[in-house]
Image (cartoon, coloured by chain):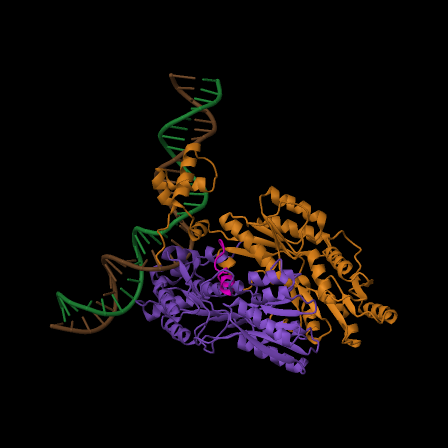
Chain colours: A orange, B purple, C green, D brown
Amino acid sequence: MAQNEKITINDIARRTGLSKGTVDRVLHNRGEVSRKSYERVMEVIRELGYEPNVYASLLAKGKKHLVAVLIPASEPGSFWELAASGIGRGVDPVTAAGVEAVSFPYDQYDIESFRAACAEVLAAEPSGVVLAPIFQGETEAFTGKLSDSVIPYCFIDSRPDSNGYLAYFGMPLYKSGYLCADQLTRGQNIRGALIVRIRRDRYQQSDPTVNRRAGFLDYMLENAPDCKIDNVFVDPNDPEGIYSTLDGYFAEHPQVRHIVMFNSRIHLLVPWLAAHPNPERRVVGFDNLKANMDALRDGTVSVLIGQRPDEQVRLAIEALAEHALLGKAPARKDHFMHMDILTRYNVEDY
Amino acid sequence: MAQNEKITINDIARRTGLSKGTVDRVLHNRGEVSRKSYERVMEVIRELGYEPNVYASLLAKGKKHLVAVLIPASEPGSFWELAASGIGRGVDPVTAAGVEAVSFPYDQYDIESFRAACAEVLAAEPSGVVLAPIFQGETEAFTGKLSDSVIPYCFIDSRPDSNGYLAYFGMPLYKSGYLCADQLTRGQNIRGALIVRIRRDRYQQSDPTVNRRAGFLDYMLENAPDCKIDNVFVDPNDPEGIYSTLDGYFAEHPQVRHIVMFNSRIHLLVPWLAAHPNPERRVVGFDNLKANMDALRDGTVSVLIGQRPDEQVRLAIEALAEHALLGKAPARKDHFMHMDILTRYNVEDY
DNA sequence: CGAATTTCCGTGCACGGTAACGGAAATATT
DNA sequence: AATATTTCCGTTACCGTGCACGGAAATTCG
């Protein structure tokens, strides 16, 4: 299986009668080469099908590429912990190819910490940035600076309406609400359902759950128009409040057996659910947090819809690595990830 | 983010008072070095924490690593076509790191073609081999030869009871039957179900569906003990026979509304299913073949259980690449992949 | 003890590309 | 026309390893 002889930069230098210095200049178009020579070189490159030798390049440059990952700090058991696990676990091929991914964590409730992390990223002069658009305004400002410095960036999780990003990796939010409704109702025409929500007050953060709820409600409108849908609001930091809220609601609506949350915190309901078992009940939530998966295992939650945040991060890093190493942009910009349906029977190997 | 200065082979040469030639000799222990020098070099290597520069090494050797992928030919619309798509789509990081994956296809019904493919693989002197153990005896013989040549190999799809492989990537077969039963019955205590099977006669091939069926039957025993389970056998190359077989069965058992197949050919039932619509019916199959996904979309199939064969191949290639480049074996040997539940609502982004 | 081996090790080029340096040729300026 | 600038390009010294070659030192042999 001998390779067809590899074309080197010297081959095309010889062929054009120029020197490899000149060839190198056109390859990285850093100027200082006449129009005529430029075109001649490009022609021969195409003709011979030259492809650069990545190792030689990396070796000569002696420089590792840096991909900055700008996501909220990974508190134990949080969604962002899952995302962070997609960053270079062990020695992966990306690392082997000379790209190092480094995390720049910030507090997702503190816009100042986000600004600080942005500044750090810029100071590190990365070859690419992966980020989740948590703070809308600040994200826009930051990506503007990245564009100025010609640093490509990828969005994960959700995506603003801008256009300068290299790629986006995330779940189709509206559709995930639709899927969620189908898993909750199993296509049956149910009569009542409860949506448990977390009140958002401070900060103009982006909120992926809005689109999910929209998809959910559209499904219900089409498939279970008679279903009465209630909303209750809870505070994630007040377990007792959650418990009493559910107590209150179900005292009034004992017939409701379908419960759903559109954020990753379905596990907050576990204490109440475990204390009030009901084989007829169906509970659907999102994201494979440890606590959520445990709830799936013990039966308090029926279905989780997962989106593999670690894969999103990995794919984003890979896209940026390819761009940095080979200058290639991915064929598509938007990559909507598969929505994983998790039940107690397939959660083990997730 | 400056790296801590990289230790080179020259550093440890200087430190030991020897030359880089000698250091190189101990690094690849190819002899011609005195006991004393050897130990001194090893000591300094450990002391300074030397790690070889992969690019420089690869560049100097001028050799690309080859990973051979030994799977059945990817006929259009087949399971193995999906698997083959995991081989270097475009310029992936593995390729960038200097590893090329090449497919060695064979006819899965022709043991001679398998033998021929094995011989080709050996002749190509690969750094690693990915293979699916279709022919049990031949596979054993082949992996024996690989072991003799110290070539690591990974199994995908299924796994023999041997022990010399580097890693295995596949679906947990027994569990997938269990999951399948749950998706088919939705946990309800149904009264009847039909298993459509393909008769295997020739060749002693490995048969993943056996374990699936075992898992399925165990679930039914535990959760729907009164369910009468029937089996019919069909020939994949005889569409009309399939049609009439189903006609015959359902004429006798009009009350049965649950149908399952444990191989990837559920799409074979589509003509009959489409001609006899029944909103109460539930059909579950395996694997995301194009035809299967189409059936999901138009509603003739309720659920597919997917295993991402392309990912299995990709992961196996990556494991071998890491081994070839860095000499590292994966932490675990057996990697049971997640079982994807596909419905019409999440099939689009798969 | 001189010659023939063997053991052990240093030297130097190659791998393919990068980029600084300096200089010749072309063009612009006085 | 002489000088000052650009424009354009060749030369060259690396980057860190691999490996062939040859030779010094140690050992064995006659």
Q: Classify residue B288 by image quadrant.
A: bottom right
In the depicted structure, whether residue A166 falls above or below residue B139: above
Q: Is residue A222 left or right of residue C20?
A: right
Residue B150, image x, y percentages: 38, 70
* Residue B341 in view, yes or no: no
Q: Which residues are magenta?
A: B79-91
**Residue drawn at the location 33% of the way across and 67% of the way down:** B30
Above or below residue A28? Residue B323 is: below
- Identify the image quadrant of residue B127: bottom left
- The C terminus of chain A: image quadrant: bottom right
Placement of the N terminus of chain A among the 4 image quadrants:
bottom left
From the viewer's perspective, tell me whether residue A193 is left or right of residue B161: right
- Where does the image place residue B308, in percent across and percent down from the top left? 55, 64
Asked if residue B90 lies in the magenta stretch, the reply is yes
Residue B71 quadrant? bottom left
Relative horizontal placement of residue A237, taking residue B103 as reference (left or right): right
For the residue pair C25 and A161, the one nearer the viewer reads as: A161
Q: Is residue A268 visible?
A: yes
